[in-house]
Amino acid sequence: MEVPDLSAEYISARIDNDFWKNVFLYETADSTNDPADLLQVQCSNESGTVILADSQAKGRGRLGRRWSSPPGVNIYMSIILVPRLASRDATLLTVLSAVACANALRHGASVQAWIKWPNDLMVGGKKIGGILTEVKSDSDKINLAVIGMGINVNIHRADFDEDIREIATSVIEETGRFQPRSGLVVQVLNEFEHWYRILERGERTALLQEWRRRSSTIGKNVMVTVGTRVISGFAESIDDEGMLLLKLPDGSLKRISAGDVTELR
Ligand code: BTN
């Protein structure tokens, strides 16, 4: 059977429906990360809801940036979860999603994707995707997590917005082959479930190990922009909560929760 480019039925039939309760596909959305705008309230709070859109009018990236979301070419997907996780572990959901996307790109599209901390999916130094995790939490626990994933799939270089043309790439640019988005979505969701179950069993070390295996950041000298500050150092590792551990020139270790990384070598 030929794989349809983007079909909720195709995807639903190939994922574990006990874990993934609903798959919604919209022709267009402002942002799939705003589920309440799209779904009835009871659904938008149900763990295991997947929201896909063929295009987004107001796609968002990290740090309030715009996420270019033209129709017919890319994956714009959000996953809703009610995880049993402490608020301080929210970054682990980004870590997990990055692992799921990188592995799906490798196994499902033959693209050698790497993870640039915290949320960038990279191929050959260019960005192929990104993750935007947004959580509602009490002081100590997460009540609802919306994890948005954007993956550039069948978009050609010439169709990227000019400001990202030199720094972005896509599956078709890397492989020269059209990739049905449904197949890649199935891979991402199955990988995600696999690693989520591992995290639920409390085996975060296994997840962090997989992340390190896929990381392009660890073991490099980096510059991290945090707001208006630039911190340079050696990226030693990530800790148990997904924070970046940077060794500074004076030998001390700095723990960084968010920032933009430039990898130097
Ligand atoms: C980044 O790299 O800055 C994160 C990009 C996240 C984009 C995805 S596309 C699906 C979901 N909806 C959004 O508006 N953003 C995320």
Image (spheres, rainbow, N blue to C red):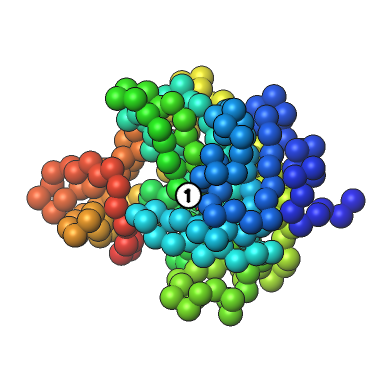
Q: Position of residue 132 (x, y in %)?
A: 45, 48
- Say which residue appears at 69% left-offset and 24% top-offset: 18
Quadrant housing residue 180: bottom right
Residue that carries the numbered disc 1 in the rendered image: 131
- Is 204 situated left or right of 171 in this image? left
- Is 90 situated left or right of 127 in this image? left
- Say which residue appears at 47% left-offset and 34% top-offset: 145
Identify the element where label 1 is drawn.
strand
- Say which residue appears at 37% left-offset and 23% top-offset: 141
Depth check, front residue: 193 or 134: 134
Q: In this figure, what is the number of numbered marks?
A: 1
| Residue 33 higher or lower than 225, as above or below | above
Depth check, front residue: 225 or 255: 225
What's under tag 1, amino acid-wise? Answer: Ile
Could you tell me if residue 141 is visible in this image?
yes
- Say which residue appears at 73% left-offset and 66% top-offset: 178
Q: Residue furthest right?
A: 1
